[in-house]
Amino acid sequence: MNESAPRTGQDAEPIPVPKSLGEIGLRHFAPYLLNRIMGRYNQSLQESLGEAGQSVAKMRTLAVLSVTDGLMTNELAVYAVIEQSTLSRTLDALESEKLIRRQAGATDSRVRHIHITDKGRALFNEAWPLFARTYHTMFAGIPAEEHRRFVDTLQRILRNIRKHDF
């Protein structure tokens, strides 16, 4: 291997374990930065969605179902990143608005699969431009290749977290 070539993947030197948060500071602590980014992202969406009488939880649920329909409630909670109790209330509201329907499982009637309705899909498609603009704004000035590497890194981090019980 050429010594001047950058190391990547498995042969890359791991990051050192910090002795304290003060050693690296908040500006360099990835979980803090991710929380700040998502907090601001959700706040921006909520401000816009609230004007239309919708919530981030409702739209996030419809977003997931628009891509992966028929999930069970526990799966939907994971994909939508919504606590089970909040999701339960959200599903009740979405069902009363006829944006989703719940269907009993084929082999276990206690299991419920959640399906987006045509009305729910239309509502999400109407809201999608807001999500797309917000996403685009987040990555303004970041080249496509850097964005791709960032998303790849996030996917690896997610796999790492799934391997360990934090």
Image (spheres, rainbow, N blue to C red):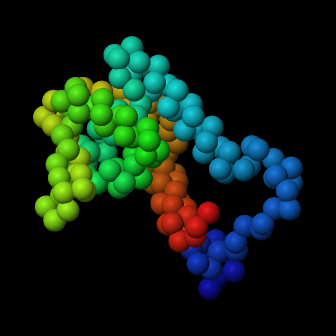
Q: Position of residue 70 (x, y in %)?
A: 21, 52
In the image, is 35 to the left or to the right of 126? right
- Disc tally is 0
Residue at the farthest bottom position:
1
Residue at the farthest top position:
51
State whether residue 52 is above or below residue 23.
above
Q: Nearer the viewer, residue 85 or 122?
A: 85
Q: Nearer the viewer, residue 7 or 44?
A: 44
Q: Is residue 141 at least partly visible in the picture? A: no
Q: Is residue 36 at least partly visible in the picture? A: yes
Query: Which quadrant would residue 2 be assigned to in this image?
Result: bottom right
Picture residue at 77% right of the left edge, 68% below the top: 16
In the image, is 3 to the left or to the right of 88? right
State whether residue 56 is above or below residue 18.
above
Query: In the rendered view of the protein, which quadrant contains the C terminus?
Result: bottom right
Picture residue at 13% right of the left edge, 34% below the top: 118
Query: In the rendered view of the protein, which quadrant contains the N terminus?
Result: bottom right
State whether residue 8 is above or below residue 88.
below
Q: Position of residue 20 (x, y in %)?
A: 85, 56
Q: Nearer the viewer, residue 120 or 130?
A: 120
Query: Which quadrant would residue 130 be assigned to in this image?
Result: top left
In the image, is 87 to the left or to the right of 125? right
Residue at the farthest front position:
110
Q: Position of residue 85 (x, y in %)?
A: 44, 41
Q: Position of residue 74 (x, y in %)?
A: 37, 54
Picture residue at 57% right of the left edge, 34% below the top: 39
